[in-house]
Amino acid sequence: MYTIKTLNAISPVGLAKLNNKQFDVAVDTDAPDGILVRSADMLNTAFNDNLLAIARAGAGVNNIPLDRCSEQGIVVFNTPGANANAVAELVIGMLIAGSRNVAVAAQWCQGLTGDPAMAKTVEKGKKQFVGNEIKGKTLGVIGLGAIGSRVANCAIELGMEVYGYDPYISIDAAWNLSSQVRHCVNLNDMLPLCDYITIHVPYLPTTKDTINAQTLALCKDGVKILNYARGELVNTEALLEAMETGKVSGYMTDFPSEAILGKPGIVCTPHLGASTPEAEDNCAVMAAKELSDYLKNGNIIHS
Ligand code: MLT
């Protein structure tokens, strides 16, 4: 019997994969053989000696101390692709919402309650929140993995001109990518072409601050940036400065921080990218299968 500890609420559809005589799923055990985790920060967690594997129900593994895991021989799984559709749909939604000032206009409408001259005030708002269509505009996608390639394909369908940059594109992602997406060998060549930039790379020491003062200087004036990957990929100081000068006209992100909240042109959501029951089920099922196959058979698979 293997003991599995869950550190976050994990979808019951996934837990059902472990619901047999070989697994005991518990929240408060001190000596699990395996851990199932979503976003809980494990960086300072002490591991028991018999811990064999950790499975993250999500793509990013930056909440797990990978160095310590490899020192202690603990195998770490993630679930690449399992929540890609959920994230890509949010990105496309926010691409349109950001272009049409949806968040700020909706918030403004809340203030109309009880306005005796509502019809007139609405006319004012109609002028104040004029937006842009995305059809015919250029989108630059940094990172063409499961999420980035989906975003790129959807944007093509919406009539955008799409550029992509990814030095490590997988064969799978390349096959699934629309032939209309134009590859750029250098990020610096792509940035000046884009009305919108969306970033879909993991957070690693090498990707920290991918959007920084130097890369922003190469961008078109008035560019809009979307970040639904990790907050650390965009340098906050450089971003705010670029928003002051009008170099960046909008920033849509899933990673709120004290420095950016309430700033004009910035729209934050609370890390909602993978927060759909469909994505939670997919991730939990994949993570549970990875964990059970490893514990029972020693197989390291991505299902
Ligand atoms: C991911 O890394 O795939 C997401 O951040 C998952 C999540 O929101 O839990």
Image: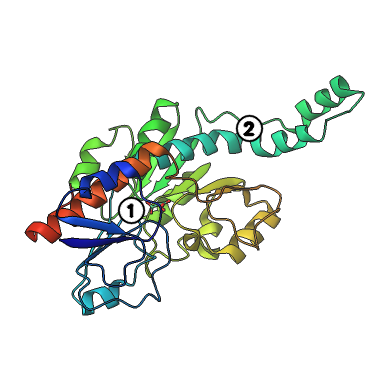
Q: Which is more toward the observer, 44 or 3?
A: 3
Q: Position of residue 153 (x, y in %)?
A: 35, 33
In this picture, residue 58 sits left or right of residue 241: left
Picture quadrant where residue 204 is located: bottom left
Q: How many marks?
A: 2
Q: Say which amino acid is labelled 2.
A: Arg
Residue 283 showing in the rendered view: yes
Q: Position of residue 156 (x, y in %)?
A: 39, 30
Q: Say which amino acid is labelled 1.
A: Ala
On-image quarter of the N terminus: bottom left
Picture quadrant where residue 74 is located: bottom left
According to the image, label 2 marks what residue? 100
Q: Position of residue 285 (x, y in %)?
A: 26, 45
According to the image, label 1 marks what residue? 59
Q: Which is more toward the observer, 280 or 111?
A: 280
Q: Which is more toward the observer, 2 or 223?
A: 2
Residue 299 showing in the rendered view: no
| Label 1: how many Cα within 10 Å (few below 14, some 14–19, many 20+) | many
Label 1 lies in ligand 1 vicinity (Cβ under 8 Å) = yes
Q: Tell me: residue 227, above or below residue 203.
A: above
Picture quadrant where residue 43 is located: bottom left
Residue with the most extreme top position: 119
Residue displayed at 40% across by 76% down: 44
Tag 2's secondary structure? loop
Q: Which is more toward the observer, 142 or 34?
A: 34
Q: Tell me: residue 254, above or below residue 276.
A: below
- First in residue order: circle 2 vs circle 1: 1
